[in-house]
Image (cartoon, rainbow, N blue to C red):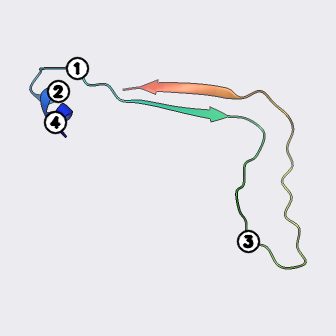
Amino acid sequence: MVMKKWDDAGKINLYYFDESGFSCIPSVPYAWQGPSQVIELPSKRSKRLNVLGYI
């Protein structure tokens, strides 16, 4: 990665950034269950908390 080499050489200041969000509303895109089983997850409405991280 060219930018990492520039950072190692002191030519730039390279920062890493990521974001994520949390809430009490579950998100399960798929699940394994038997033909007669029903999978339920208890949940309640809540606000979403978004966080950012820099390194």
Q: Residues within 10 Å of mark 3 (few under 14, many from 20)?
A: few
Q: Are marks 2 and 1 in contact (CB under 8 Å)?
A: yes
Q: Earlier in the sequence, mark 1 or mark 4?
A: 4
Q: Quadrant of the C terminus?
A: top left
Q: Residues within 10 Å of mark 4 (few under 14, many from 20)?
A: few
The x and y percentages for residue 31 are: 73, 65
Q: Residues within 10 Å of mark 1 (few under 14, many from 20)?
A: few
The x and y percentages for residue 52 are: 51, 25
Q: Earlier in the sequence, mark 2 or mark 1?
A: 2
Q: Quadrant of residue 46?
A: top right
Res. 32 mark? 3
Label 1 sits on residue? 13
Residue type highlighted by circle 2: Asp
Residue type highlighted by circle 4: Val
Compared to residue 50, the image places residue 32 above or below, namely: below
The alpha-carbon separation of the residues under discs 4 and 2 comes to: 9 Å
